């Protein structure tokens, strides 16, 4: 990484995929691939962000994103502070603005924010005084998830151009789908979305994707099958009759995998609902790269923190 490149990254926010160019995404993937090796060492630590402070501010539950940002920061020697809303003064009525302003007053070097409201991270970026990384804002965006997903695809497939990616499940409520579509379209991948009509956003075709409601078609043509969770916590009633009926039509099963290409990979951002959108034998089976995605999450978040916080080369 040249001095010039590092200077271009330092102090920036990462709020959505369109904040990045295709070249910058490839730069992040290359940097993350180098950091992945650190996690294989006995001593998993670099001095890169020594003396820097990263705050994880999570207003929604998370296992993968929060933990991987924490591990990423610590592997780069940053001090990492985790704040979850249940333990914060938000429970006493403090506003989002005041929470961010108070944390900003303690001079962190990066703030990772997850919130149920689209735009929360963008708003925080206007008052935080340090780089803000969107760890997921409602159904809007989850840029680091898309970046780690692209890293996983890049490792298994020859480039993104002409790659057929089928994204299947609750597209309507999915920030992961929106961020992946935005990223994949930058590289001219062919993206198909598959869901019941009630779980597709209005005008989804304008995102440059093909639409099908037929699981067999979505699976048979795909190089990458990306399954999504039904987000009951964001869902109005009546979008489908029951989870059982949803699973009968849209669960990725071994039977469906028999129609897939031999070198297909199956992805899922997690958390997975076994037996709803994905059968256990598929989630745990030979095509699944779900846990590789989680491993790449640490490496990609190391790359993001390193670049935005202006870490020293090591
Ligand atoms: N993929 C993802 O965002 O998982 P978490 O909700 O556990 O962070």
Image: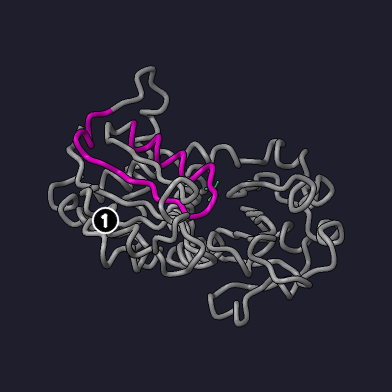
- Rendered location of residue 289, percent (x, y): 60, 41
Residue interval drawn in magenta: 46-74
Quarter-of-image position of residue 312:
top left
Left or right: where does residue 213 sit relative to residue 88?
A: right
The answer to whether any part of residue 40 appears in the image is: yes
The quarter of the picture where residue 221 lies is bottom right
Residue at image location 31% in from the left, 57% down from the top: 132
- Asked if the magenta segment contains residue 205, the reply would be no
Q: Label 1: few (<14), some or many (≥20) within 10 Å?
A: many
**Quarter of the picture holding the N terminus:** top left
Q: Name the residue beneath numbered marker 1.
A: 131
In the orientation shown, which residue stands out farthest toward the front?
92
Q: For the view shown, which residue lies furthest in the left direction? A: 3
Q: Could you tell me which secondary element the residue under label 1 belongs to?
A: loop
Which of the two residues, 16 or 153, is positioned nearer the viewer here? 16
- Determine whether 270 is above or below 11 in the image: above
Q: Is residue 61 magenta?
A: yes
Q: Name the side, left or right, on which 240 lies relative to 204.
A: right
Vertical position of residue 232 compared to residue 270: above or below: below
């Amino acid at each position: 990484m040249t001095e010039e490149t590092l200077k271009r990254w330092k102090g920036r926010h990462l709020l959505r995929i369109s904040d990045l160019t295709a070249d910058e995404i490839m730069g992040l993937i290359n940097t993350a691939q180098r950091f992945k090796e650190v996690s294989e060492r006995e001593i998993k630590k670099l001095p890169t962000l020594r003396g820097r402070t990263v705050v994880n501010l999570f207003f929604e539950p998370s296992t993968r994103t929060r933990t991987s940002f924490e591990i990423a920061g610590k592997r780069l020697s940053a001090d990492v502070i985790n704040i979850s809303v249940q333990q914060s003064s938000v429970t006493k009525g403090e506003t989002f603005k005041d929470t961010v302003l108070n944390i900003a007053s303690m001079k962190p070097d990066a703030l990772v924010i997850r919130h149920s409201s689209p735009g929360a991270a963008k708003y925080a970026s206007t008052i935080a005084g340090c780089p803000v990384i969107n760890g997921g804002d409602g159904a809007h965006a989850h840029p680091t998830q898309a970046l780690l997903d692209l890293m996983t695809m890049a490792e298994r497939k020859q480039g993104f151009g002409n790659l057929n990616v089928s994204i299947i499940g609750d597209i309507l409520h999915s920030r992961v789908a929106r961020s992946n579509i935005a990223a994949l379209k930058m590289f001219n991948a062919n993206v198909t979305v598959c869901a019941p009509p009630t779980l597709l956003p209005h005008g989804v075709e304008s995102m440059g994707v093909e639409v099908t409601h037929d699981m067999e078609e979505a699976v048979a043509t795909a190089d990458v099958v990306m399954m999504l969770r039904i987000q009951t916590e964001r869902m109005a009633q009546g979008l489908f009759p029951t989870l059982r009926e949803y699973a009968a039509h849209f669960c990725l099963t071994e039977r469906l995998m028999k129609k897939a290409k031999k070198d297909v990979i199956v992805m899922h951002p997690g958390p997975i609902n076994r037996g709803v959108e994905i059968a256990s034998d598929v989630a745990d089976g030979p095509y699944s790269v779900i846990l590789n995605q989680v491993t790449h999450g640490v490496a990609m978040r190391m790359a993001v923190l390193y670049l935005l916080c202006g870490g020293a080369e090591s």
